[in-house]
Image (spheres, rainbow, N blue to C red):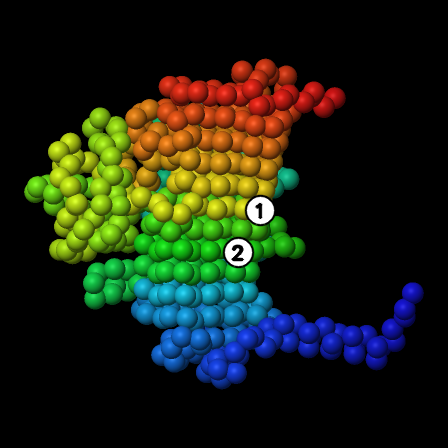
Amino acid sequence: MIRLGKLGICIWALVVIVQFSDACHAEEPGRGKQRIFRVADFGAAGDGKTDDRAAIQKAIDAGVKSGSGATVRFEAARVYRLGRHERALGMLIVSGAEGLTLDGCGATLLSHPSNRIMAIHASKKIVLANLVLDYSPLPFTQGRMHVVSPKEGYVEFKAADGYAAPVLGGSKVYRDFKSSDCVFVRPDGAFTHSWLRISEITEPSPGVFRCRFHGAREHVMRQLKRTAVNDLIAVKMIFPQGKILLAPDGRHIATGAANINIGFCHDVVLRGITSYAAPGMTFNAHGSEALAVENCAVIRKPKTDRLIAGQSDGCHLKSLTIMPKITNCRFEALMDDSIAVKVSGEIVKRKEGNRVLLHHGDIAYNDCVVKAGDELELYDSSEKKHLGFAKVTATRRVGYRKIWATLANRHATLAQGDRVYLKPITPVEIKGCKFGSQLKTAISKLPPGVVSGCVFNDTSYGVHAFTDARWPCSGMPRGIVVRNCTFINNTVAALAWSTPSPGASPPAKFSLKVENCRFSLDGMKGYLLSAGNAASGISFKNCRVNIKDGRLLKQVVHTRNCNAVDITGIAIDKPNK
């Protein structure tokens, strides 16, 4: 054994620090031509107390102005405070940039929850790397419930030490909307997979908070029966938000949706980012092509008792034709889905020959981005069926979220109220990701693609490919491969598939292929597969399932209106004793 004296330990520590610094400042090919903009040179203190927002923004602006090849660099182990900023919802803005790298070197961005940490807008070839994201004050509070009354429709709790009291108020404060969500968590940190929206919080005695909820009495009762006294509750805190900034074309530069918001960009890489809290989503991209998310984590902050890591989706990506790649990421303790990938739809408002007036059908900060050369999937909303494909030869923008699109051919069956979706030209790739206990789905929506080498542990759904017949927020799924994955105790279904009708999805060689996967089902809950209206076939190859509660295979596979479902490739393991 080698023993180090005090001097030796000091020298060893210094070597480690220098090595970390060298890793951050390592020579890259052609680095001599690069331009490095250190946030410290613009006045950022990184002491966790000083409001560094303005100084960091100056460094970013200088990097953007200098052109492709610039790097904005933070200092390792520093905490950069981003104080409340009323003039703009996004704390840090990257807009109109190309070839810019923001290297956090392991630093922390600590934001106020009235704002969101960063917006990347109308930019190309951006790398955002090696940052930790957190909030102070926290955007949620939590505590242990000492009263759970399903019959009366309320719970009572005390805020845990170190957590703020919830905001008191009724429906004027707690609308039936995402900002009023709460979730229930067991003492061991596992989610009960039940949630409600708060309608009122009162304080019947000092330090005791009573929550009542939106929804029918039966619904509230059903959700509360899934939790119990001594379980924990996490409640979103409500903070006034900064102003929304709009570009001259009407597009949102920043939104309140996510810690990192990416809008109307091409080729953005998020690498090595760890997020410990989020007032909404953690990563959100819309109208943006070729996004990569690599080695990122949305997790509870270590060495704390925090119940949640994010208050909505972990990674919500509305890509267009070049689908995202998500690799080696971790997600846990989320109040919604871990990953949602979808192609937002347009609604046909008018038709004149081979010209159609399209209005974007998704959320307000998304815009119609159809352009000449794109191919569209056509969908009959009333009959719930695929109508074919159409090539776009020209477009004319007539307002925010509105364009005229000229199609190569006249499509007689396309009518007012129908929907069109951009046709993906590359597959979604989700590889090597791990999903821990959370509220809803690990991977949802999902255009054609491959999910491989992932572990799904204690999520409501593992992979859920579906579209909503009422709202054009996602195209029709098909051609999805799930291979070399492990599914453990998914409370609703390990795999799920649903479309409005068997004819809704475009023709495909298959709907879903499952290969070399392992499933573990427990407690008379959760299907291995739940599928409806899959027209192109579902198959399993070299898969195994351990059904610990003794159900038969046919009892854990539920299908409706599906063609060619082949489960012969599933072998049953004997239950553990």
Disc 1: which residue: 432
* Secondary structure found at label 2: strand
Residue 463 image offset from top left, x and y in percent = 48, 36
Query: Is residue 283 among what the camera can see?
Result: yes
Residue 506 image offset from top left, x and y in percent = 32, 33
> Which residue: 25% across, 63% down?
246
Residue 520 image offset from top left, x and y in percent = 62, 28
- Hey, which quadrant is residue 171 in on the image? top left
> Which residue: 16% across, 56% down?
397
User: What is the three-letter code of the residue carrying label 2?
Assistant: Glu
Q: Nearer the viewer, residue 477 or 354?
A: 354
Decide: marks 2, 1 in contact (CB < 8 A)?
no
Q: Nearer the viewer, residue 150 or 15?
A: 15
Residue 104 image offset from top left, x and y in percent = 53, 69
Q: Residues within 10 Å of mark 1 (few under 14, many from 20)?
A: some
On screen, residue 546 versus residue 506, left or right, reads right
User: What is the three-letter code of the residue carrying label 1?
Assistant: Gly
Disc 2: which residue: 294
* Secondary structure found at label 1: loop
Mark number displayed over residue 112? none
On screen, residue 79 versus residue 118, left or right, reads right
Q: Nearer the viewer, residue 416 or 407?
A: 407
> Which residue: 20% across, 48% down?
392
Q: Is residue 380 above or below residue 557?
A: below
Does label 2 or label 1 sit earlier along the sequence? 2
Q: Is residue 574 above or below residue 181?
A: above
Q: Quadrant of the C terminus?
A: top right
| Residue at the left extreme, as displayed | 352
